[in-house]
Amino acid sequence: MAGNNDNPLYDAAEEQKSQVSTLKIKVPAGADSASIMNKEAPLSISERDFIVNALRENVRLDGRHLDQFRSLSVSFGEEYGHVKVQLGKTRLIVRISSEVTKPHDDRPFDGTFTIALELTAMGSPAWDNGRQGDLETYVTNVLDRVVRHSNALDTESLCILKGVSCWGVRADVHITDYDGNLIDAACIGVMAGLQHFRRPDAVVKDGQVIVYGLDERVPVPLNITHKPLSVTFHTFDEGKVVIIDATRKEEQASEADVIIGMNGAGDVCFMSKFSGSPVEAMVFVKKTDLALEKVKEINAIVDKALQADLAKRAKGGLAEQSRAENDR
């Protein structure tokens, strides 16, 4: 009976099997499987309209002004270079580390500096562990341009022996909770970590590099040339409404974003518009003054946290480790 093709029940079963075997999932044009698996649920039309209409009336869902940051908290761990940053509900941890390595052949007098960021499911259920997405690449590139390319860290001071050995400094950024404005929060964490970090002391004797432990010699702070930070703006209603420090829902409802990297002296070291609708250039030329104001405010918060950590270490008898000068 199983091999009888004249059986109508057999024919129906075979037809159903054929339909099931040819069933395919339709993927939107231009989207790969990684982006589909890593895609966040979009806002509904009613949610988007509610947020945009409220912003037209200068009202934000959390009660802030359009040009107001959420509350910022910066704290340090027991290890040098261990920083916790909380910006609203966005939380992240930055760890700065160093090791002796070989300098690049084209920069024999310079050390190396690397920023690494990984988005995992710990920060958001929309992110997949071990799968690099566009957001991760974009945020890493912006941090690299704002901090490393602007020479915030003096890499020449990391040289130990020309062309032979140098210090390699690495900043690892771990996102623990994501609710918007990832770039600004990560930039704050990296800059705070670089200012807080102390590397082991090292000397050259008879052509050999000797690295002293933290209990043998006072660790050495990094040479920070300036303190750049990023300020991210989002636009709504054809660029008529501009806000800073957007939450995740505000980011999803926005038309475009523009990032300005600036230090406390007012030097613009980075500006980028990655995607979204066109924006009049003069809109953001006028926003540079606001960006400078926010950079100064944030740097003041970081400086205050650094001073509080120094006082805490002094109370614990560790002030000498962060202040005394080494015998050279």
Image: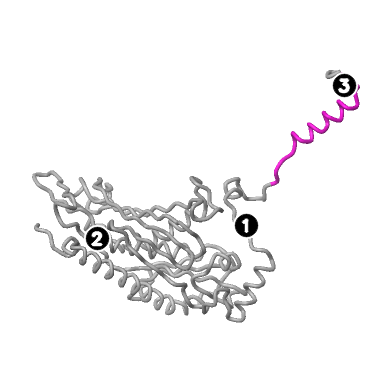
The answer to whether 204 is drawn above or below residue 328 in the figure is: above
Q: Residue at x 72, y 40 (%)?
A: 24
Which residue is identified by label 1? 41
- Residue 145 image point, x, y percent: 39, 61
Q: Residue at x 40, y 63 (%)?
A: 85
Which one is in front, 44 or 259? 44
Which one is in front, 178 or 251? 178
Mark 1 or 3 closer to N-term? 3
Q: Amino acid at mark 2?
A: Leu
- Residue 224 image point, x, y percent: 27, 64
Q: Are dots 2 and 3 in contact, CB under 8 Å?
A: no
Displayed quadrant of residue 266:
bottom left
- Residue 315 image point, x, y percent: 21, 66
Which residue is identified by label 3? 5
Label 3 neighbour load within 10 Å: few <14, some 14-19, many 20+: few
Region of the chain picked out in magenta, as a range: 4-26
Q: Quadrant of the N terminus?
A: top right
Residue 8 magenta: yes
Displayed quadrant of residue 74:
bottom left
What distance separates the C-alpha of mark 1 from that of mark 2? 42 Å
Q: Quadrant of the C terminus?
A: bottom left
Mark 1 or 2 closer to N-term? 1
Q: Is residue 278 left or right of residue 164?
A: right
Q: Is residue 284 left or right of residue 237?
A: left
What distance separates the C-alpha of mark 1 from that of mark 3? 48 Å
